[in-house]
Image (tube, rainbow, N blue to C red):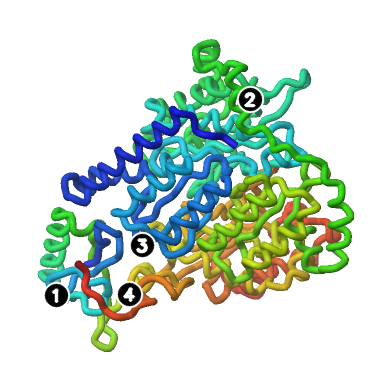
Amino acid sequence: MYRYDEFDQDFVKARVAEFSDQVQRRLAGEITEDQFRPLRLMNGVYLQLHAYMLRIAVPYGTLNSRQLRMLGHIARKYDKGYGHFTTRQNIQFNWPALSDIPAILADLASVEMHAIQTSGNCIRNVTADHFAGAAADEVADPRPYAEILRQWSSVHPEFSYLPRKFKIAVTGAERDRAAIQTHDIGLHLKKNAAGELGFAVYVGGGQGRTPMVAKKIRDFLPEADLLSYCTAILRVYNLYGRRDNKFKARIKILVHETGVEEITRQVEAEWQELKDAELKLPEADIQAINAYFAPPALRDRPEGDAAVKQARLDSKSFSEWLDQNVETHRHPDYAAVTISLKGIGEVPGDASDSQMEAVADIAEKYAFDELRVSHEQNLILPHVARADLKTVYDALVEIGLATANSNLISDIISCPGLDYCALATARSIPVAQEISRRFASLERQREIGELKLKISGCINACGHHHVGHIGILGVEKKGTELYQVTLGGSADENTSVGEIIGRGFSSEEITDAIEQIVDTYLGLRLNPDERFIDAYRRVGPAPFKEALYAGETKAA
Amino acid sequence: MKVLTANRLSDGIAVWYADGGWAETVGHADIAHDKAAEDRLEAIGAAAGANNEVVDVNLIDVTVVDGLAEPVRLREKIRAAGPTIRTDIGKQANPQPARAA
């Protein structure tokens, strides 16, 4: 994986020193909160309901065991023994004291981590396919390009005060696991007919109160032009993006209001001025970054086939976990493992300090020291020999992280909601927990099949509800929590925004409603291979509305 | 009825104005029963903000239950107790009223 060079290390160290000084001055009363707020946000420090919250960047979701161990250490020493992995592949701590944050940042810097640009109207942590470098269907590893974007966007003087925050995602496979079409810029790394690498470029996707699917503005951008083209997009946005209304300031609104053709024309015109200048990526530089992401030396381990076959016979639960949480690797003797942070009734995305340390140990011993955080709030071991899968599984059972529910209904994305978040209007985690408990039976979940359920506790949509096959949005109505259901959303290569199905449900009703939706789907699907989203696209909302609201004389 | 709440600058912990200081629990917070009392609390909050003791100062609605102030809105109830999903942490884990520094 990427290692800091001297420049990176000095830069992060200098930033820690700078922010430590700002914290000291704030605590001493030398600067006001109004002066301090933008500074703390630039360093990932929010003020939430109960305390400060620190959001730490995990660039493109890639971690090594040393870094995960450090996160466990921070959870134990400075927080309340746990951390929360987020949909931007980051981690948040919910209880740090402001006075401890300089020490936390110094600890992070010692393992090449930081919290820079995890907030504010700048280019945020660039995300990538969590199976990058391992997936069998990958054209090329997207992470080197995500790293190039990280270097370019870090404290970029022109793009540090954008109209609004800006999110970029990169995938290297046709099957989109990085939800690129829900991003301000989505990049699909692919090869053209001549076998050259480049990107399909999508612009103007986003969720929040105005969900939009990104529009493809270029089918193939040569890799060398990555930065000049992104700069052109950002320049057009920075110039014309609305600053008069926070709710209309994202690039999706600009794209929508200007029109795809005109935006494309503007970007291309800007790009013509830039493309042959200093932003053109030299081949040697691309190679140098690529070298950091060279795959580990995966020696052949053909004994894995027999080992897995035998272990399957010995253990039904291992067999189910293999079916659900183990992904095909480009090397036939290896697999990519999803460590579910969605135990039945647990808080989606939370991991304790000791779990983090134990997972770090497993990664070090059995996964070439590599880990990923997925935007679906799970951890990934990208390279595990099939011969070691049973050992890894047993180790995960020990720490309560062997739930075999990847991509099933209990593998829920949930924002922190009103239990933590100062912006939330309703709780989301308890809803996730109750649905998870209702569908606790793995047999039942497997019968239902792939079902992406996503929950947000306010219209900002951090829980990605718009693109859930089933989405739940919590709002406050007349002083109580009300949950609105959307159906038919999707965050893959066929991204769609879900449709509101009807009146909302109270916290007492919502789990029954979800069960009703699922039962309706089971009753109408053509066969067990027809996924929920496919069935919904075939039949539309009517049967679900009928099931949920039949007999109601009027819409609330 | 309203009480004055904020987050303590140094550690961000939610606090409520009570008896001339900032308490870590809401129960014994000073209650404003009329506009004049609200204005007085607001002035105290503004001064405490300016004095860098607390941040994010707000007046919130409360009722009185068994002689103790209790927030009306769910958001403030959760702030006063802790996450509803982790009753082992936050103020609810340690119900003894404590006096903030």
Measured as percent of width and height from the top left, residue A348 is found at: 57, 62
Q: Amino acid at mark 4?
A: Val
* Residue A107 % position (x, y): 41, 47
Q: Residue at x 67, y 54 (%)?
A: A488
Check disc 1 and report its element: helix, strand or loop: loop
Numbered disc 3: what chain?
A
Nearer the camera: disc 3 or disc 2:
3
Residues under labels 2 and 4: Cα distance?
A: 53 Å
Give the residue pinned by disc 4.
Answer: B72
Q: Chain of mark 4?
A: B
Whether residue B1 is situated above or below residue A239 in the rendered picture: below
Q: Residue at x 35, y 68 (%)?
A: B79
Foreground mark, 2 or 1, reads 1
Q: Secondary structure at mark 3?
A: loop
Please name the residue that numbered disc 3 is placed on: A49
Left or right: where A55 falls relative to B26: right
Q: Is residue A30 left or right of residue A202?
A: left
Q: Which residue is mark 1?
A: B19
When asked about the image quadrant of residue A145, the answer is: top right
Q: Residues within 10 Å of mark 4 (few under 14, many from 20)?
A: some
How many residues crowd mark 2 within 10 Å: few (<14), some (14–19), many (20+)?
A: some
